[in-house]
Amino acid sequence: MSVDFDKAMDEIQASIIEDARKVYSERVIERWLSPTHMGEMEKPQGYGKVKGPCGDTVKVFLDIHNDKIIDAQFITDGCMTTIAAGSMACELAIGKNIKDAFKISKEVILKNLDGLPEESTHCALLASNTLKEALTDYLTSKDEIWRRLYKKQ
């Protein structure tokens, strides 16, 4: 019985992936099935959380040293295209300085995913906006630290 169930599940999964390949690029499929940079950070220097118009939520966590992004992680309750876009946003951010990371737009994410169907492009915007929210959080926190230090003098 268990072998039959496992076989049926494998067939269903293969069918879903086959159907997805008719609509999505291989880059989207790769990041959906094996998303990179998925997870939470315990003490991020930057954190953003945005809920998209479709109801998906993305959280981005940034590890930043000397204004350079060392690591980026994300989690989402969203669909496959939100997963792919979040993964790509984090991948593109790592190694960049803050100024360049702010340039990671919906269009940049779409280009690096080899596109998304029109009805899914909002997922790239959601990932971009969440990354920018995390970057803004970092800059706001950094500014607050400098203000506190300045007041002490």
Image: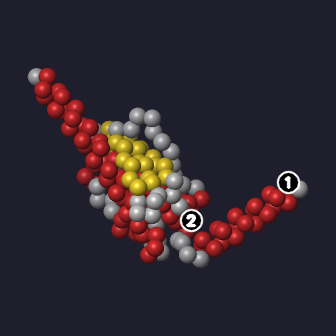
User: Tags 1 and 2 in contact by the CB under 8 Å rule?
Assistant: no
78 left or right, relative to 153? right
Residue marked by disc 2: 29
As drawn, the label of residue 15 is none
Front residue of 66/54: it is: 54
Residue 122 position within the rendered picture, expressed as x and y whole percent measured from the top left? 41, 67
Residue 113 position within the rendered picture, expressed as x and y whole percent measured from the top left? 46, 66
Residue 58 lies, with reference to residue 68, above or below; the image says: below
Residue 46 lies, with reference to residue 82, above or below; the image says: above
131 left or right, relative to 58? left
Identify the residue shown where x is 18% and y is 33%: 146
The amino acid type, in three-letter code, at marker 1 is Ser
The amino acid type, in three-letter code, at marker 2 is Ile
45 left or right, relative to 118? left
Res 77 visible: yes
Residue marked by disc 1: 2
Determine whether the residue tagged by mark 1 lies in a helix, strand or loop: helix
Image quarter where the C terminus lies is top left
Res 91 visible: no
Q: Quadrant of residue 1?
A: bottom right
Residue 82 position within the rendered picture, expressed as x and y whole percent measured from the top left? 48, 60
Between marks 1 and 2, how big is the CA–CA gap?
28 Å
Front residue of 127/68: it is: 127
Front residue of 133/51: it is: 51
Instruction: Report the residue that reaches farthest toward the right.
Output: 1
Instruction: Report the residue that reaches farthest toward the top.
Output: 152
Q: Residues within 10 Å of mark 1 (few under 14, many from 20)?
A: few
